[in-house]
Amino acid sequence: MWFFILAELTVFAIFFIGFAIAEQLHSDMFIVSKAKLHPIAGLINTIALITSSLFIALSVRAIHLNQVKRSINLLVISQVIACVYLVVKIWEYQFLFNIGIDIETNTFFTLYFLITFFHFMHVLLGMVILLIIGINAKKGAYQEDISGFESGASYWHMVDMLWIILFPLIYVI
């Protein structure tokens, strides 16, 4: 899992560097384009993902204490909160499409859609991983060794950390 996380972080680092270079080359376009985004939507997504990560951390703590039912309940809460991110991001994409903005609008929006959709897909994969570790926990898989549970949680924290970088890079700075 750590190799996979490192590979994913490398891909996102390349995206971030490309975004920063493009922003330096087209600063006026980026300023105008960023103004069309909804920073409140980005903030809601940031709060949702950080809160979701908190519940994952609490779930890991519960599994360490052999409180399997509590751990599963915390995973479910985390998943519900993660759905807030999905709904808000889909709303944001729909809003942009409705005003005629898409991946071909300009360099900023090409990178915006590419990077945020790539992240969106990682959120979905993270939710699947959390579902799998929840099912495995319910089956008693983590009574002896919780490394698989911790690996799934680590992936989720990576996804959240990436958003914490994406939010200011795309919406704020």
Image (cartoon, rainbow, N blue to C red):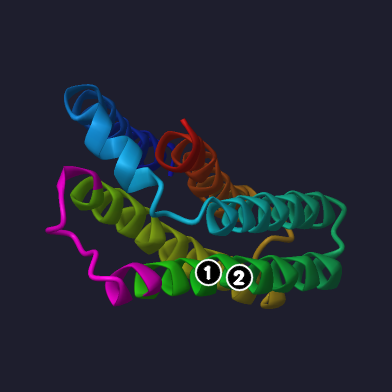
Q: CA distance from mark 2 to mark 1?
A: 6 Å
Q: Quadrant of residue 136?
A: bottom right
What residue appears at the point 41 percent right and 47 percent down from the top-left corner? 35
Q: Nearer the viewer, residue 152 or 54?
A: 54
Q: Nearer the viewer, residue 162 or 47?
A: 47
Residue 9, position in %: x, y? 37, 35
* Residue stretch rendered in magenta on the structure: 95-108
**117 is higher (above) or lower (below) than 160:** below
User: Does residue 119 appear in the picture of this structure?
Assistant: yes
> Crowding at label 1, few (<14), some or many (≥20) Cα neighbours within 10 Å?
some
**Residue highlighted by disc 1:** 88
Residue 104 part of the magenta-drawn span: yes
**Residue highlighted by disc 2:** 84
> Crowding at label 2, few (<14), some or many (≥20) Cα neighbours within 10 Å?
some
Specify whether 144 is left or right of 62: left
Specify whether 50 is left or right of 112: right
Q: Nearer the viewer, residue 73 or 39?
A: 39
Residue 122 part of the magenta-drawn span: no
- The answer to whether mark 2 and mark 1 are in CB contact below 8 A is yes
Residue 38, position in %: x, y? 49, 56
Specify whether 87 is left or right of 13: right
